[in-house]
Image (cartoon, coloured by chain):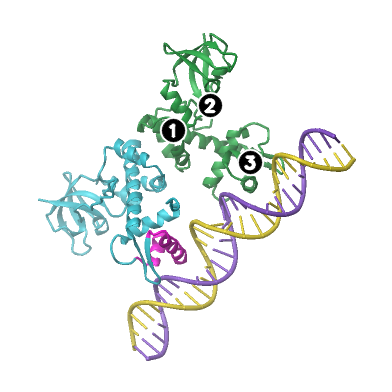
Chain colours: A cyan, B green, C yellow, D purple
Amino acid sequence: MRKAFFLTRAEENYIKTIFHLGGNETQLISTNSIAEEMETKPSSVTDMAKRLARKGLVNYVRYQGVTLTEKGKKTALSIVRKHRLWEVFLVKKLDFNWDEVHEVAEQLEHIKSEKLIDKIDELLDFPKYDPHGDPIPTKSGEFQERDKQLLSELPIMAKGVCVGVKDTSSSFLQYLDKNNIALGHSIQILEREDFDDSIEIAIDGRRLHISNQIASNLYVKQHD
Amino acid sequence: MRKAFFLTRAEENYIKTIFHLGGNETQLISTNSIAEEMETKPSSVTDMAKRLARKGLVNYVRYQGVTLTEKGKKTALSIVRKHRLWEVFLVKKLDFNWDEVHEVAEQLEHIKSEKLIDKIDELLDFPKYDPHGDPIPTKSGEFQERDKQLLSELPIMAKGVCVGVKDTSSSFLQYLDKNNIALGHSIQILEREDFDDSIEIAIDGRRLHISNQIASNLYVKQHD
DNA sequence: TCCTAAATTTAGATGAATCTAAAAATAGTT
DNA sequence: AACTATTTTTAGATTCATCTAAATTTAGGA
């Protein structure tokens, strides 16, 4: 019988970051990019890469980078699942605003209790998306990105429903709140300004002028 | 401006243990008793005692023991508050049984977010007691033990309401479940067996014979 | 008072997670 | 093919939290 499988908080955070950087796919993730994302030093990442490799969570090639193993992917999905379910819980049950949930969910995602997260899932009636529109992996690890495009990439006159945000910073989310843009709203592109790629949109009967910065951080699902 | 006040998980656990051992009062708590309670070594406790003293959370007297400072007490109450509120949440909102909540609450009590625990408190409608009958400190740190006695200390024919448990082990709580003994039930002592101090009780119209072991782990509030 | 047993502390070690500074490997360019 | 800039790794140090083993202090007899 081999030693019980247990991950420290730091290990879980590395796994999650590698996943978000695309460790899912085949290309190797560089230690530098991980360090940058986690605001830590490349040398620390190297150490951790070795540790995670020893535990069978990543494939580590010296001077090349890492990818997640199957076990690593499963772990990452479980953490992402917990993070996003907790975010839904905070918004739906405790009236947190969608710009306040991230920090707290970063802590809650490390709570170790399968029963707890399953019960939370049930309490929330098995949500498919988190408050930012990101999909929640199922208990068995199924995970499907929603069919979506950046608002900035839609052609003139195209219509769509707002389904997610790319940037999840407080300032961006608060901008959206202030302008009454929320998931589920219908949007139509009315005009595009060639000079700065800003666009004029119709949203819920109102007209609104938004910068390219904004439009390229809003996901929509196009319809006709 | 001095360094931001921050406690590690280990530090919080020590503070909590000292509180439970009576660090509230004036007598010093020995390193040995702390080590025993936490299933660690006395030498580890000594190290931590120094660290906590440096941070102003305990008064540490070499070879004598520790007491909590005002700051330490405040910290302890905040942790106990979080632990007990989470226990209520698990039982009331997620249908955990009262013998399953401790472990998970041990993790949840370390989540750092004032807003989160205040919202949980509100969601639960500001409960005064946890699922084992222990009082929940208020946000401002008020904390009052309920007026209660051990069932084993009640005289013959005395009546009372079950208000808490002393032992919170799974096996004890499951015994109570099996015999349909729960907080809020009325109990009357009918007979006491001199030989082994076991007692015959009336509870909710039923008669039940329970050992002294059981009776000395059940709290009741006596009435007439 | 002196002695011994128990409690407590010190000293030194270990593993996790991090850092800095220096060394090594890689990749792009002439 | 050789040079250089960048990336990555190594080596060595630090802090936290823990341990074991040895030394010290305290407290309770005889």
Marks 3 & 2 on one chain: yes
Dot 1 falls on a residue whose secondary structure is helix
Dot 3 falls on a residue whose secondary structure is strand
Q: Is residue D15 above or below residue D30?
A: below
Range covered by the magenta-colored residues: A29-57
Q: In this view, does A35 lie above or below B38?
A: below
Q: Name the residue under label 3.
A: B58
Q: Which chain carries label 2?
A: B
Residue A34 position in % (x across, y down): 39, 63
Residue A163 position in % (x across, y down): 22, 49
Dot label at residue B203: none
Dot 2 falls on a residue whose secondary structure is loop
Residue type highlighted by circle 2: Lys
Dot label at residue B166: 2
- Mark 3 or mark 2: whose residue is earlier in sequence: 3
Residue drawn at (53%, 47%) of the image: B8
Q: How far apart are marks 2 and 1 (CA)?
A: 16 Å
Q: Which of B101 and B85 is in front in this view?
A: B101
Q: Report crowding for label 3: few under 14, some 14 to 19, many 20 or more residues within 10 A (C-alpha).
A: many
